[in-house]
Amino acid sequence: MFKEEKDYGIETTGPLPLIIHAALLHPEWTIRKRLWKKLNDWLDSLGPKHTVNEVEVVIRNFKGTTLEPFFLDQKNLHAAIFLTRLAFTKIQGQTRIRINSQDNPLNRGGLVLTHNLKTYFIEHLASAKYTRSPKTHWVYNPGREPVRAKLPPKLPAKGWIGGHGYEASLDMKHIMSEGWTYEKIEIPNLLRHSFLKGTNEALINLGFDAWKSHNRLHIAIARPELMIKLGPRISSQGGISLLLDQHPEQAKTTKISLHMEISEEQPKPLTAQVSLGKTDLGGWIHTSCGLAPELDEKLIAVLKHWGPLSSRGYKTPR
């Protein structure tokens, strides 16, 4: 997405940025409308300190400087107002939020609003009054909005019964997330830190096999005792689900959720969903908010087909 750059914002792991991203950019207007209604109704239920108009007036009246003008179009203004009102709710308790001009692709600088809607500007000019971008603030960087093509919602995958037993094959050549490029996949770490959902048992302990070949990752169940144990579930309509990871359990690592439902020798499509640990989308939104509006199953299904998931899912505790 962007060259490696120092983070100037709080670590972000919840699903909220992904929902806002879809509310802004999903190709279907009806989906965008439904998502914004969910977001706004949820925010209103939290008792925001400031009204939409109060925040909008402050942001619209700020123009930046001659060298560093500040501008947000209507779409990004909408998101900035939402995040500002959310940041200053009692439950979130933030004292600052930093909002960048949409013409600035960097993850630093910008307009800072305080909880009482006072403002100051962090400039790149070394002689300016404010030049430091704190790491603890919520941040909205619309100039860093990620290109969706680099965030695949799913990986091409197929499964069949063959010489390796129940086998799944995932095409890894288009995934750009850290640690998941084909060259960087380390099979011992994968088997050690991936597990069968519902059991939290590591694949290496269960007896799964894995290998790489021609830009594809293969996961297989070939050991007789494991085939006897899991075979009936894999060949049933429910199947089994694996959470693939290469690191010790960490909220911020990118994972792949693989659903194995295999009953034939002929290869059939499987679902392999990209699941983001860090959800700032390349420094687009930094927020400590672990909450999100409750989405119905149909809306969640739409989002699963359009963009990557949060590893924490879309249903978060209130």
Image: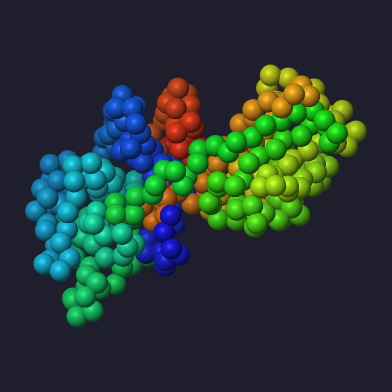
Q: Nearer the viewer, residue 4 or 40?
A: 4
Taking the spot 68% from the left edge, 44% from the top edge, the residue there is: 216
* Residue 219 locus on image (x, y percent): 74, 40
Q: Is residue 81 above or below residue 299?
A: below
Q: Nearer the viewer, residue 268 or 305?
A: 268
* Residue 227 locus on image (x, y percent): 85, 30
Taking the spot 39% from the left edge, 47% from the top edge, the residue there is: 147
Q: Is residue 269 above or below residue 285?
A: above
* Residue 87 locus on image (x, y percent): 29, 49
Taking the spot 43% from the left edge, 63% from the top edge, the residue there is: 3
Classify residue 257 by image quadrant: top right
> Is 290 on the left or on the right of 74, as rendered?
right
Q: The C terminus appears in which quarter of the rendering?
A: top left
Q: Is residue 128 above or below residue 137?
A: below
Q: The N terminus appears in which quarter of the rendering?
A: bottom left
> Is 265 on the left or on the right of 138, as rendered?
right
Task: Count all numbered tags in the image, as a single digit.
Answer: 0
On the question of residue 101 being in view, the answer is yes
* Residue 72 locus on image (x, y percent): 19, 50
Q: Is residue 9 above or below residue 316?
A: below
Q: Nearer the viewer, residue 10 or 238?
A: 238
Give the color scheme: rainbow, by chain, secondary structure or one colour. Answer: rainbow
Taking the spot 34% from the left edge, 54% from the top edge, the residue there is: 144
Residue positioned most to the bottom? 127
Residue positioned most to the front? 214
Residue positioned most to the top? 237
> Is 228 on the left or on the right of 149, as rendered?
right
Classify residue 33 by image quadrant: top left
On the question of residue 34 being in view, the answer is no
